[in-house]
Amino acid sequence: MKKILRPCMLALWLSIFCTMVFASCSSNEDNSLEGQPTIERIAERGKLLVGTTGDYRPLSYLETDGNYWGFGIEMAGKIAERLGVDIAFVQTSWPTLTADVLAEPQIFDLAIGGITITDARRETMLMSDGYLCNGKTILCRADEADRFRSLADIDRPEVRVMVNPGGLNEKFALANLTHAQIIVHQKNEEIPSQVAKGNADVMITEITEAPWYVQNDPRLAAPLLAAPFTHGEIGVLMRKGQEDLLTLVNSVIAQMKADGSLRQLHEKYGLVYGY
């Protein structure tokens, strides 16, 4: 005899079937996050927390209206896009950067914006692959560009060199300029104008930062831009134990190199593309 399902029985079977399908889909989603604790935490939160200094044009800058812009800010957006979450920026500083990355409870998931990859940082934290070539150079007044043609020209008692505290610029100056006057100025973004006004002769900076100021202030020059004192790369910084997030970030960087979007970002901000 052929069995006929009554409406109530049919509804029950449909309910059971849908529950099984939903459970299967949920199981597949859970499996995709299995073994990825950082990514899972970010996904559950629905937001990527990004630490950035906001004082480093054109990589990371905080405007008076509270909005961030820059090369690194757009890179962070690409990472959040890959994660499928929103993004929120948390202000940090160069003197407190390491402490903020390692803080308990955790303040942000990763830090971005002008952070040079170094062995010292890799000893205690994780750093991504490089996405921007970097190197130490100087800013000076345009009418004194011929005065500074080498590190020896800068390392003189009469030369006033201004740096921001706590970062690699200060470390470079202290290690390499033993005769020049080193002036520490708290706000990195104010130093170019201090040089332009004559309150300092030289700013130790990076090849990623100097071109923006030269283009936007005719009083300034970067005479050693083509011959930086050091060579390095800028990457994304995060605490150890977040290897799953590091893998994802490196995947985003690799994809941007492959599809040409990283080159386009360099061109947008007037930076040298070295990949």
Image: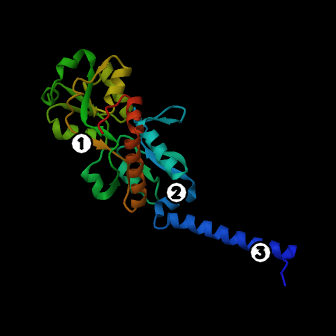
Q: Report the residue marked by disc 2.
A: 42
Q: Secondary structure at mark 3?
A: helix
- The residue at 31%/20% (across/down) is 220
Q: Are marks 2 and 3 in contact (CB under 8 Å)?
A: no
Is residue 31 placed above or below 49 in the rendered structure? below
Relative to residue 24, is residue 76 drawn left or right? left
Spatial distance from mark 1 to mark 3, Cα to Cα?
Answer: 71 Å
Q: Report the residue marked by disc 3.
A: 13
Q: Secondary structure at mark 2?
A: helix
Disc 2 vs disc 1: which is toward the camera? Answer: 2
Q: Amino acid at mark 2?
A: Ile
- The residue at 34%/29% (across/down) is 191
Res 138 → quadrant: top left
Spatial distance from mark 2 to mark 1, Cα to Cα?
Answer: 34 Å
Label placed on residue 171: 1
Q: Amino acid at mark 3?
A: Trp
Q: Residues within 10 Å of mark 1 (few under 14, many from 20)?
A: some
- The residue at 27%/31% (across/down) is 162
Q: Residues within 10 Å of mark 2 (few under 14, many from 20)?
A: some
Res 46 → quadrant: bottom right
Query: Residue 254's spot in the image, x, y percent?
Result: 37, 47
- Mark 3 or mark 1, which is nearer the start of the sequence? 3
